[in-house]
Image (cartoon, rainbow, N blue to C red):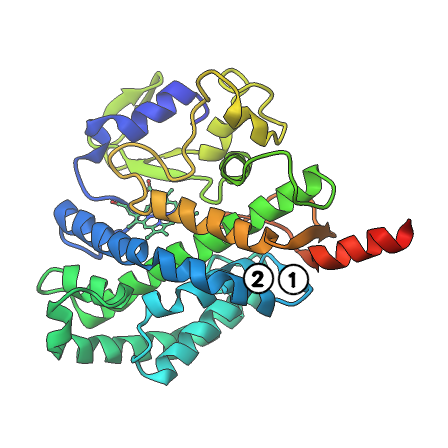
């Protein structure tokens, strides 16, 4: 659907939100259960933000002077959220398998067949081990208290009757949202900043505006769908009940009638007066992403940490999106040169 107003009405009209959100599919029995789970996970991640901020400088240093992106994005986010995803007392085998899956590319649908095959090879052991652990956690009294991690939130908020395996699938879905969506959005922010400005920082934009504009220019989730609630006519066309109407945040973010020069990457637009155009990197309406604010903080904190005391230079990337299930950046390298080294080079060059 290309018409912005029509598209927004699909995402905002209560008629299209009578049932459950497609994000969770049929894994949960009701919309109430979906909302409760979304909130529980969001709360775990929100509570983890101070620890995340603390972990970032060390994890950024671990990337080394030259890192390979976009895969470094999910990896960095994973390194700094690992304790919230799976608390440190969980079996080490479980930590090992989750880390391996993140490294192997489970974080998003990968562009190449060989990458997807690698993910599928990792999946059975990962799912079996998490499912076994879910079974144990369900019997533990600990799950009755405050959730210690995202898995506790899933176990605690899933209604009675949810199978161990479904809880595992819910956990993996959320793991992908947290580590993958945030990690790739981080990669886009760094790539676009580097392509549109000489090595920085300083960049001429606040980090907030940079992250916001990157999510406008290259929204990681480029398509969201809603089932048609009953046979109806929409935009002059007839639709059968349950037909999926898809709205593209990507197209709406590039609507020349609603945005000033949308084809340009201009973080400064967020600091100019006037209403922005339709902006929905986290969707819009009743089924909006439950982690919107947390995700935005995770990305901006990571950009800030990577830029702290270093000059960032991008190598080999371009801004064309790789459209798989989502919008991935093409491979690029990130060079982090400590600012002290940059100053020494400048002094020596005088
Ligand atoms: C850059 C990062 C992220 C992006 C781009 C993103 C995007 C989205 C989008 C577009 C949807 C809605 C899909 C639809 O309308 O059908 C969604 C749903 C959701 N997201 Fe995110 N997300 C991100 C990070 C997160 C994080 C960090 C969390 C958890 C803390 C999270 C939890 C959820 C949940 C629970 C839903 C389902 C909401 C519901 O149905 O009530 N997301 N996300």
Q: Position of residue 21 (x, y in %)?
A: 25, 44
Q: Is residue 139 left or right of residue 66?
A: left
Along the viewing direction, whichever of 122 and 234 lies nearer the viewer = 122
Mark 2 packing: few (<14 Cα in 10 Å), some, or many (20+)? many
Q: Is residue 319 visible?
A: no
* Circles 2 and 1 in contact, beta carbons < 8 Å: yes
Q: Is mark 2 within 8 Å of ligand 1?
A: no
Residue in view at x 69 percent, y 64 percent: 65
- Horizontal and vertical percent position of residue 222: 47, 40
**Residue 60: which quarter of the image?**
bottom right
Q: Where residue 92 is drawn, which disc sits there?
A: none
Q: Residue at x 51, y 15 (%)?
A: 257
Report if the beta carbon of the residue with label 1 is closer than 8 angstroms to ligand 1. no
With 267 as the anchor, is 51 left or right in this view? left
Spot the residue most to the left: 160
Which residue is the site of mark 1? 68
User: Which residue has dot 2 on it?
Assistant: 72
* Camera sees residue 229: yes
Q: Quadrant of residue 68?
A: bottom right
- Total marks shown come to 2
Secondary structure beneath dot 2 equals helix
As drawn, which residue projects farthest toward the right?
A: 350
Helix, strand or loop status at disc 1: strand
Q: Position of residue 70 (x, y in %)?
A: 59, 56
Q: Nearer the viewer, residue 27 or 207?
A: 207
Percent x, y for residue 346?
Answer: 83, 51
């Amino acid at each position: 659907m290309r018409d912005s107003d029509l598209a927004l009405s699909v995402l905002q009209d209560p008629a299209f939100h009578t049932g459950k959100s497609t994000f969770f599919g049929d894994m949960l029995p009701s919309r109430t259960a979906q909302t409760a789970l979304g909130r529980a996970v969001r709360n775990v991640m929100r509570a983890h933000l101070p620890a995340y901020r603390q972990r970032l400088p060390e994890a950024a240093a671990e990337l080394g002077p030259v890192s390979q992106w976009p895969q470094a994005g999910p990896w960095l986010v994973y390194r700094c959220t690992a304790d919230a995803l799976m608390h440190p007392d969980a079996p080490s085998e479980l930590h090992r398998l989750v880390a391996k899956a993140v490294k192997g590319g489970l974080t998003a649908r990968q562009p190449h067949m060989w990458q997807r095959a690698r993910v599928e090879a990792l999946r059975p052991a990962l799912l079996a081990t998490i499912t076994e652990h879910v079974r144990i956690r369900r019997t533990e009294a600990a799950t009755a208290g405050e959730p210690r991690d995202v898995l506790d939130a899933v176990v605690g908020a899933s209604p009675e009757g949810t199978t161990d395996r479904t809880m595992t699938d819910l956990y993996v879905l959320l793991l992908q949202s947290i580590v993958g969506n945030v990690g790739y959005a981080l990669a886009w922010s760094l790539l676009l900043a580097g392509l549109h400005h000489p090595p920085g920082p300083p960049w001429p934009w606040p980090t907030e505006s940079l992250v916001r504009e990157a999510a406008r220019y290259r929204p990681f989730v480029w398509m969201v769908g809603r089932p048609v609630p009953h046979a109806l006519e929409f935009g002059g066309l007839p639709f059968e009940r349950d037909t999926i109407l898809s709205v593209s945040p990507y197209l709406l973010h590039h609507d020349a009638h609603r945005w000033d020069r949308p084809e340009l990457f201009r973080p400064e637009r967020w600091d100019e007066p006037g209403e922005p155009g339709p902006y929905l990197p986290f969707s819009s309406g009743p089924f909006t992403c439950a982690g919107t604010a947390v995700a935005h903080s995770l990305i901006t904190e990571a950009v800030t940490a990577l830029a702290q005391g270093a000059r960032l230079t991008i190598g080999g990337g371009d801004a064309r999106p790789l459209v798989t299930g989502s919008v991935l950046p093409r491979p690029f390298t990130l060079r982090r040169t400590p600012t002290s080294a940059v100053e020494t080079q400048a002094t020596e060059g005088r």
